[in-house]
Image (cartoon, grey):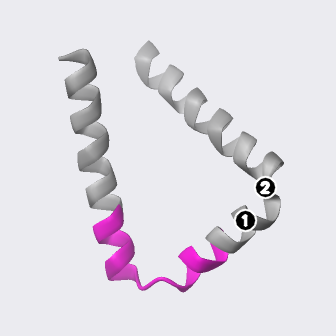
Amino acid sequence: MLDFVAALGLVFAIEGILFAAVPNLAKDALRSAAETPAERMRLIGLCSAVVGVLLVWLVRG
């Protein structure tokens, strides 16, 4: 559980740095995501989840 909380904190830190460093690029990315069809977002989300699980599995193996 501690690893999950640490990973969640890292996600917040990275996103915070992105929004602070390049806010216009972040706004453009959010706008683009809002215009992306739901099916494509599902596919991207599923692929991202699989890659994330594989990375954790390889590192923690």
Q: Is residue 22 above or below residue 55?
A: below
* 28 versus 53 height, above or below: below
* Residue 41, position as x, y percentages in the image: 39, 72
Name the disc covering residue 22, or none.
2
Q: As drawn, which residue projects farthest toward the left?
A: 61
Q: Is residue 18 magenta?
A: no
In the rendering, at what x and y percent does residue 36 appear? 48, 82
Q: x and y percent of residue 45 in the render?
A: 35, 61
Task: Write the residue at 78% across / 55% down.
Answer: 22
Residues in magenta, as a range: 30-44
Picture layout, residue 48 above or below residue 38: above
Figure quadrant of residue 4: top left
Question: In terms of image quadrants, where is residue 9?
Answer: top right
Q: Which residue is mark 1?
A: 25
Looking at the rendered image, the quarter that the C terminus falls into is top left
Q: Are marks 2 and 1 in contact (CB under 8 Å)?
A: yes
| SS majority, magenta | helix
Which element is circle 2 on? loop
